[in-house]
Image (cartoon, rainbow, N blue to C red):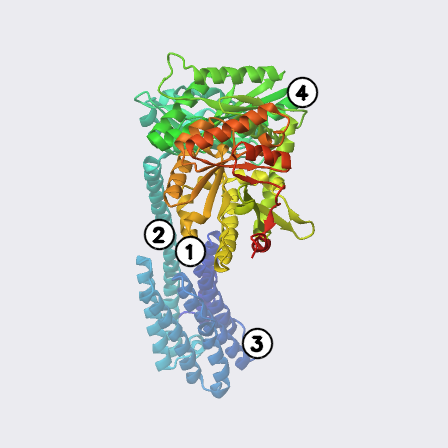
Amino acid sequence: MNLDARTLAFDFILTLVILGGLLFFFWNHNRKISALAWWSATFVLNAIGIGLVNLAPGLPVHPKLMLANGLVALGYGALYTGARIFNERPISRLALVVGPALWMLSYPLFHDNIGARVTVISLITGGYAALSAWELWKHNPHRLTSQSAAVALLLVLTAFSLFRAVAGLPMGSMFRVDALVRSWSSEMALFLIVYVPALAFVFLGMAKERIEAGYRDVEEALRESEEHYRYSVELSPQIPWTSDPDGNLLQVSPRWHSLTGLPIEQTRGWKWMAAIHPDDVPLVQEKASRSLKTGKPYVSEFRVRLVDGTYRWFRGHASARLGRDGAVLRWYGMIEDIHERKLARDRLHWAAYHDDLTGLPNRRFFYEQVQRALDQATKAQTKVGLLLMDLDHLKLVNDRLGHDAGDALLREFARRLQSLAGDRYAVARLGGDEFGLLLPEVEHEDEVVAIARLILNRMQNPHPEDDPAHDCRTSIGLVVSLGFAMRVEDLQKQADLALYQSKAAGRGMHMMYNPTMSEVAQKVASALETAGRLLSSDWVRPFYQPKISLDSEEPVGFEALLRWEHPRLGIQYPGPISPAFDDTELGSALGARMRSLIFKDMRQWLDAGLTFGRVAVNVSAAEFRHGDYAECVLAELKGFGIPTSCLEVEVTESVFLDRNAGNVEQALQVLSAAGVTIALDDFGTGYASLTHLKRFPVHVIKIDRSFIRDIEWDAGDAAIVKALLGLAKSLHIEVVAEGVETAAQLEFLKRNGCRLVQGHYFAQALPASEVPQLMGT
């Protein structure tokens, strides 16, 4: 077939340009398949290279051939790069430029040999075609049918290039040499004109198939997402919904219908509110309306009526989707079942602010109420009343009947107190046996006193509905706020002081706070602080006042008295720290320190062969409260090796009246049985002295100095002393008269049969170092 070579070259170049432009157009229209751009470059670069050879006869031959075939090689490199990109693999820059570089570097070696030129460029183009075919066949992640067709066409191109490499037929000869070559070259040119469009359209088919596969993947992912959403919505405890900008419900999860039983038509618009508890509707409407006006999200908790008629707690969340102009396009919300969490939270809140045993508010809740009442009173310029109450006999009930009985007593007291307070006053259990009552608005103290009397009467004289088996008697401390901006801590302290004074006055009483109570409390606090300091600083010193026998006027024993040595002021009397003896811990610690020092002195006297008779040790009520006083004393005596007959334990009648009188009796019985002498100090100044002489093991009574002081001219004191001496003689109890300071007092006591005295008339209290000298050693 004889065709004009230049015409065929022009047609082929035009075909390449058109196909390259077509590929570029489709890439530019849908940039998802970037391989189309590279394949477009393949066609265009080949068109430029062939055009330079065949359509530019005026250019120098060798530079033209070197540049033209370099562009062709680069175009085939773009072919392979496009194949890699189509398979979503990274670009290989080395593979892209190695073909053109090889051609440019080798061309000077054979530029005069047309066959060598054809062979080299054919090997380069055939190698790129083979690599592209391998890439599309080996790495075909989407298994596209058109991709397999492209592999077949690329293999044909590979075979064609290898044939040219073997035959050594240059492209230029195909159009401009002898007739045989032109005839063959024309056929070949026609073949390429047919082949190249086929390859281009296969590439387009690949792109189309890839895009369709992507759409299918997207559709599948969308279907999966929808299924996931449907299952998530149906199985989730949360209920999603949407509404229009006016709040009219458009869509809601089917779970809402299954929960409430409301059909869909009764859910549209605002009809869904029919399922909300009537008490919660106003709050939900108010929050929703405010959000509709502002466009801001909101959260609300409310109860929803279920199909069975019961209610459960839900929490609603809502947020608006806004348009570009800021207007609400649609509301999206979620309704979440929080019933169990809500109940648990309410239970925890209740437990945090209430007493589990009585159901009353606890200390924390009560004093928060007191603080609010004080704040309100400051604004309104009114007063607040506070009552603090202690059950008088709770410990006794616990000890005798057990804690179940004590709990029952607390519940009965709380019930009576609550019935008295009603809704007007706030009551609380503050801890242990302590209760509080708040009067938020008081005009005068009389109102508080009236309430206290009402409480005492109700507790002491039960109503018919009360349980008479419970002794609910109580002591009450009262206080009314003074001035404005008063702190709850100050009011509480004042009520505590009043309660303390009420209990000290005899229990079953009420007492109003007055400022002197704070002064006394300050003195007590100072005394306790001083006592603690003298213990920690080892300032305690025992002094010994001799007991004198009137028969021999010689010492026959001693009473150990506490003194303490201040580093600057010297020896001090115990008066400033006397409140410490009533404190359980400090009183016990002071007693233990005194015993340790006294027993040490007694041991030294015994070792020195000194006969000192008995040493009397004063014991406070606090020391008996631990329950093991006797055992500790006997163990200490044994540890020092001191006979029990050398010790005398001195107690006052107030010790017998302490709430731990049972411990006192047991301890004295144990000590007496072990040979320790028991002395009753300040005899005649307390209550029920004769009863104490009968109940407790008393070997010695000591007549208080208040009876001795005026004995010379006070007939009453003289008569009392005579009576006490006669009583002791009848009971075979030893008598010691305290505070003897004059000869007349001494003569009276001798004349009436008193045999033992102590006082400044004979000697003041001495340090241990002076005792041996007094005893005449």
Q: In the rendered structure, which disc, 3 or 4, sits on the residue that comes first in sequence?
A: 3
Residue that numbered label 3 is attached to: 58
Residue with the most extreme right position: 568
Q: In this view of the protein, which residue sits in the foreground, 504 or 14?
A: 504
Residue that numbered label 2 is attached to: 213
Label for residue 639? Answer: 1
Q: In the rendered structure, which disc, 2 or 1, sits on the residue that comes first in sequence?
A: 2
Q: In this view of the protein, which residue sits in the foreground, 31 or 534?
A: 534
Question: How far is disc 1 from disc 3 in space, using C-alphas?
Answer: 134 Å
Q: In the rendered structure, which disc, 2 or 4, sits on the residue that comes first in sequence?
A: 2
Can residue 300 be spotted in the picture?
no
Query: Does dot 3 land on a helix, a strand or a loop?
Result: loop
Q: Return the x and y of residue 78 as percentages of the image width and height.
A: 45, 68
Which quadrant of the figure contains the N terminus? Answer: bottom left
Crowding at label 2, few (<14), some or many (≥20) Cα neighbours within 10 Å? some
Q: Return the x and y of residue 480 as percentages of the image width and height.
A: 61, 22
Disc tally is: 4
Crowding at label 1, few (<14), some or many (≥20) Cα neighbours within 10 Å? few
